[in-house]
Amino acid sequence: MPETLSTRLSRSVSADFFRPLARPSAPVYVDCADRLIEEAGEAGRLSQRETTEIIREVIARHPLSLLAEDEGAALRDARQRAGQFFNRLIAAGWLEDQTLGLHERWAVVTPGLRPLMRMLRDLAEDRVAELKTFADTLRGLCQTLEERGVLDPQVNPPDQLRSTITDLSQRLERAIEQLHAVEKIVTSFEQRQRQTATAADTLNLLYEEFGQGQHMVCYDALRRGGLLTRIENARSAISERHDDPLMRERLATGLREHYGYDDTESYDHAVMMLTRLERDLGGLKRRAEAIDLRMAAFNRLSQQRYRYQTELRGRRPELVKAYCDAINAASAGGRFSEFAGQKADFAPRCVETRFFFGSESLYKPRRTKMPVDLTFGQSSASKQSEDEVLAAWRERQRLALTPQRAARLVAKLLPSKKGEMSTEEITLETADDLLDLLAVVAYEHAPALAGKRVRWSVDGVRRRNGLEPHIIEHDEIAGHRVERFTIKREA
């Protein structure tokens, strides 16, 4: 049975290693470790005098932190307090005291402190630009998998295969961590948006802070440049190697030679590495889409929050709150028993309170409009006869664009089905013929005189080159210039 994580962790660090993070003075410990690692650099060590100076500066920046007795809370001298805190860092295993001579003492940063601080920095990451680095990481991973023979067990030695699979797994794990960090960023923006006080704060958070990286959404980054297709191809390549017995055997040999596993353990680790790599590649798309949904939900939340603050809340709740705050400020430190027997004071507490006097402050009824007479009246002095009404109706029918007149023109121009004709070939003279042509453009089918349905379609150059009007040709029809188009009768 493989060892648990806690068992392996107990062999690497002491039991007091994580205790500073659970103390009330945890911010002081974290800032001290961050400063010491930064100042130590690649050498990884500082003199004891420099270390205590840095600790003293960090403690001075946290005047409200509660230090315990063993951290120098009872000491007034800042140097003594920094020395006591230095001892706590050594006891926790974050620093190591190294003595090279009688007067030469060094503080060495322990190996376990750097991964711990790296994890804390990842937790505190709040840059939306992580989306771009996520895409760059995946692009480099796909480029490695697309190299010819990079995972060929017949060409590469076992140790080379182990190194390649380990490197791919680490880079993919880094990309997944960046995705989770981006999701944490969106969640933090949602929490801040729910606590905005004014509509201006809501818009500033949406467009100024959150909008800086909104154009780099995850799904677009995956699709840009065919990255999504490349990831699917990489997953297919890993799946083929996962089912290859020679690949498993060669990878197990590399793990056995590098880590000293036995045959069974090395083979199980090889299968597990290939399975995890294939599974993580397949889950990238779903995770990126989930983050895009969170970003869309944040946009909807911002819109709802802005609408609530501008349309639903109004000024009345703010006036009541200001009145209550004024009463609390005027009566701070008092008791209700002290107001017994005192005369009530109704002095205005809010600046925006206004008093209106006279008739202008009275209720004014709404002015209603008189009802409108909607009855039809005579449009002219003389009454029209039946012949005049029928003539006017026929004139309106002649000018109406109906499907029937369009079908008559199509049947006249294209007697056979599947025929087509351009306006360059059409010859029309009267205005009625021009109206028939406009009806053809307006409709696509109509019943013919014989009862059968006539269908046609109209296609012109403007549909394909609408932004280039200078290349569209025109034809002269019935004294009017018409853009060239083609009429095609359907079967």
Image (cartoon, rainbow, N blue to C red):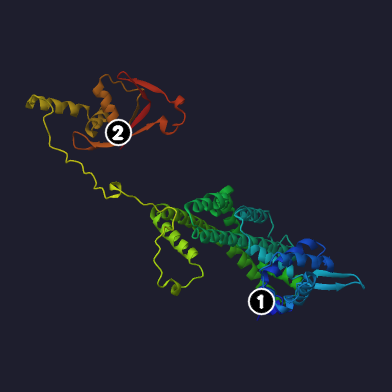
Q: Quadrant of residue 253?
A: bottom right
Where residue 99 sits, quadrant-wise, is bottom right
Q: Of the residues under marks 1 and 2, which one precedes in the sequence?
A: 1
**How far from the left and from the top, in percent, is residue 78?**
77, 69
User: In this rendering, does residue 432 appear at all?
Assistant: yes
10 and 399: which is toward the camera: 10
Where does label 1 land, which residue?
Answer: 5
Query: Of 302 and 74, which appears nearest the observer?
Result: 74
Is 214 on the left-hand or right-hand side of 320? Answer: right
Which residue lies at the image location 19% right of the left edge and 27% below the top edge? Answer: 398
On screen, residue 330 versus residue 222, left or right, reads: left
Q: Amino acid at mark 2?
A: Ala
Give the secondary structure at mark 2: helix
Q: Position of residue 215 (x, y in %)?
A: 55, 49
The residue under the point 49% across, 60% down is: 194
Q: Residue furthest bottom?
A: 1
Which corner quadrant holds the C terminus? top left
Q: Nearer the viewer, mark 1 or mark 2?
A: 1
**Viewer-nearest residue: 26 or 141:** 26
Residue 250 visible in the displayed image: no
Question: Which mark, residue 442?
Answer: 2
Q: Residues within 10 Å of mark 1 (few under 14, many from 20)?
A: few
Residue 484 in the image: x percent, y percent?
38, 26
Distance CA(mark 1)–CA(mark 2): 74 Å
Please give the name of the residue rendered at 59% of the width and 54% of the height, measured from the top-left corner. 128
Establish if 431 lies above or below 21. above
Question: Residue type at mark 1?
Answer: Leu
